[in-house]
Amino acid sequence: MNKPKPLISAILNLNLHPKPLFSNPIHLMALTQTRITHSDPPQNDAEDDVLCSNPEQTQEEQPSSHSLDETPSFVGSPGKYLTGVSRFERAWAHWTKLGRPKLIVAPMVDNSELPFRMLCRKYGAEAAYTPMLHSRIFNENPKYRSEEFTTCKEDRPLFVQFCANDPDILLEAARRVESHCDYVDINLGCPQRIARRGYYGAFLMDNLPLVKSLVEKLALNLNVPVSCKIRVFPKLEDTLKYAKMLEDAGCSLLAVHGRTRDEKDGKKFRADWNAIKAVKNELRIPVLANGNIRHMDDVRNCLEETGADGVLSAETLLENPALFAGFRTSNWVVDNEKDSIDGKLDQADLVVQYLKLCEKYPVPWRMIRSHVHKMLGDWFRVQPQVREELNAQSRLTLEFLYGLVDQLRELGVRVLLHQKDDASATGNLAEVIGIDYPDQCELSRRCLE
């Protein structure tokens, strides 16, 4: 079957205009559990689980919820994903309806929450995943649901990701969110010890019949497509059999992290783009590439080398949420400074924008603390005493964090983000991505307005 050709559009032009900043969030419902964390500092117990909401907010001002009974608008219907060629046509029709997003925020536990997703979207991200949600706790605990999953109408396209090892529990959780997302995603790639203990994520690679049953359960019963995110096996033939099994079970989109379950350190192990390319060539559904995406040159190279339909970035976005707008941190321009220009943006600017989004969309303080450490990591290395002040706070406030940014600036710290001064590279990127990628200087102006 011939896959549809990429649509040429001005998606980035649409996404990069600063939004008048956004509508009321949708809060669903769930509780604190043992988590993987990406932050440098220790957690501060219960205080960091408190939402950063305004205690004086009236009941009328509380964010409104959308009904969980709403039926999503989507190409296809439940129970039809296992019916031959038409299933692949529906998978592509749905992806095309979403605009074929190519620049995507990867799922990150405690880190890809609503305010951060919206910040990344402002700077070019075209789609995003929620943090991984624990399906059983999501069903059982209203507090967990309301704190761990929030969204708003501008937060689309959206993948809601669950970990699970029971098809019925997974389906119950998925039904709670299907009217608020474009895909329900199954986490089959988490390699951390918590996933081993909980028997989910990449540790289900040892039980492929269970994995197949999870996918089939959702594909046969949901009103939105099911997607999966996996890691590769050490042997390519095993990876290809795994991917084909997922497609046959009803997966409508597959994201492939090009590292094995044992390759946890992204700085030590390079993702295998050749394995991703092989999966893309094997399957008839959209395939996304994950791994080694540190700046837009990597985006271009990955799309060219793998043929993937989009890329995911995780760790680099935590330090630089403006990655997809063409900005890069100084460590990626050291050997090529003559080709880079001052992007007129720094990470402190991004922290302030993130905090303003947190005022709009309250999230637990542990998430905010983690993001501040990640985005200001280079700054704290210059003024470590400011980082110690942050770590000493058992209870954070937005006022303190705004003041911390001001303090760094008063100390003369500024670590600039850079952009590549190469018009031909911009043109090549537009050709590879298949969208009208705007001039870098114009892009800077829009993002900073």
Image (spheres, rainbow, N blue to C red):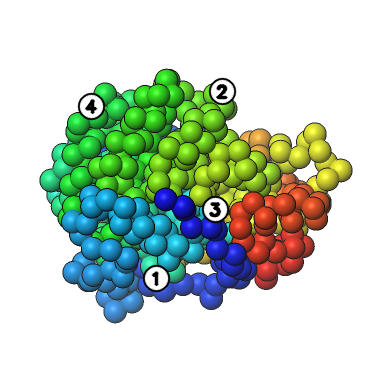
Q: Amino acid at mark 1?
A: Lys
Q: Amino acid at mark 3?
A: Leu
Question: Disc 3 vs disc 2: Cβ atoms closer than 8 Å?
Answer: no
Horizontal and vertical percent position of residue 269: 54, 24
Q: Nearer the viewer, mark 3 or mark 2?
A: 3
Q: Which residue is mark 3?
A: 103
- Disc 1 secondary structure class: loop
- Determine the secondary structure under disc 3: strand
Furthest-bottom residue in this view: 60
Q: Which mark is residue 153?
A: 1
Q: Nearer the viewer, residue 4 or 407?
A: 4
Question: Residue at coordinates 23% horizontally, 27% vertically from top-left?
Answer: 207
Mark 4 vs mark 1: in front: 4
> Which residue matches tag 2?
268
> Is residue 392 among the parts visible in the rendering?
no
What residue do we see at 81% from left, 38% from top? 336
